[in-house]
Amino acid sequence: MTLQQLSYFLAAIEHGTLSKAAEALRLSQPSLSEQIIRLEESLGATLFVRTNRRLQLTEAGRRLEPFAQATLSAARQGHDAVQSYRSLSGGVASFGTFGSAHHYFLTELVTVFRQRYPEMRLRLLGYNSSEVARAVSDGELEAGLVMLPVDERNLKVNEPVWSARVGYLSADPARLEGAKTIEDLARAPLILTEARWCHGDPVRRLLNARAHAAGVALEALIEVEHQATGFELAARGLGDMIATRPILHHLGYQDRLGWVPIEPPLFEVFAFIQRHDTPISPATRVLIALMREQLENIQRRYAELER
């Protein structure tokens, strides 16, 4: 039994004769008759009483008719659902971003996406980069924008799309004399963020690797979850931060906190990730393209700060 055979069966009922059904379907009558016969053979029952005037349904035909209609209706609905998904007129784009992304571009991104694709729904989650990588690896999200490096082996990491130099921030001018080495950071009154993901946070991992090589350890005076909280505490003189200049300016603390670079240079580097074995949907591809535009604008906006 095939969808084509069920379609021909219903057409024969609608038009009353095989010749009229074949004409409506733009088929030869023998071709249509052959498919009806094959359907009957697969069911082991006769569906029509064939007369010289009009086809008459048998009891088997009457029983099959509602199921044939339901089957073809479900097939059309399935086809329409996939087409709307492909044409961005339905479905959900699911994506994960690093935790502070909402400070930079998410509101503008969602606004533009909704204006261009009003039938699409969005599911945007903001996590630590390690958590985004895990969610993409587990198939909970289609793709993500994360800070490198990531560990999940089944992920495809695309080329970097944004980077920013990491530095040392303080409200005390006396602690802002010259670039900071890892030894300087080990002696500093640090406020560290990403408390929940401290061991998986990419910047912390890079700094801890430097500290280990230098035979020192980074110890937090204060440890909090959110970067905005850390900035406010640092601005009140309760400790010093490790962060980039763009987030310093974007959060509006450039008049309350000074910034000096870390040496050797340390960068936050961001890239898009997806699973190796799963192609992303057209909707998420469009979302990524829009996000690239947003990141290019941010990179240009803060280019002067990085010089």
Image (cartoon, grey):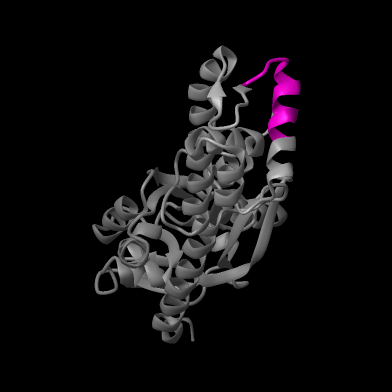
Q: Quadrant of the N terminus?
A: top right
The percent position of residue 269, horizontal first and vertical second, equals 57, 66
226 or 7, which is in the foreground? 7
Query: Would residue 236 appear left or right of 51 to someone viewing this image?
Result: left
Q: Quadrant of residue 59?
A: top right
Q: Residue at (63%, 52%) from the top-left corner?
A: 274
Task: Identify the image quadrant of residue 273.
Answer: bottom right
**Could you tell me how many numbered marks the image carries?**
0
**Whether residue 190 can be seen here:** no
Q: Is residue 40 left or right of residue 268?
A: right
44 is within the stretch colored magenta: yes
Residue farthest top in this picture: 59
Q: Nearer the viewer, residue 154 or 195?
A: 154
**Could you say where residue 232 lies in the image, as x and y percent from the top left?**
26, 56
Which residue is painted at 28% across and 53% down in the image? 233
Residue drawn at the location 72% of the way across and 47% of the way down: 277
Q: Is residue 180 magenta?
A: no
Decide if residue 291 is in sight here: yes
**Which region of the structure is painted magenta?**
35-47
Answer with left or right where residue 302 lies relative to residue 37. left
Residue 264, how many percent across, how many down?
63, 72
At 46% from the left edge and 67% from the top edge, which residue is drawn?
291
Compare residues 227 and 302 and report the one nearer the observer: 302
Residue 24 lies, with reference to residue 7, above or below; the image says below
Predominant SS of the magenta segment = helix
Q: Is residue 203 above or below residue 127?
A: below
From the viewer's perspective, is 224 left or right of 285? left
- What is the quadrant of residue 31 in the picture? top right
Relative depth, front residue between 94 and 246: 94
Image position, residue 39 (x, y; %)? 70, 27
- Against 48, is 276 above or below? below
Return the residue found at the far front: 52
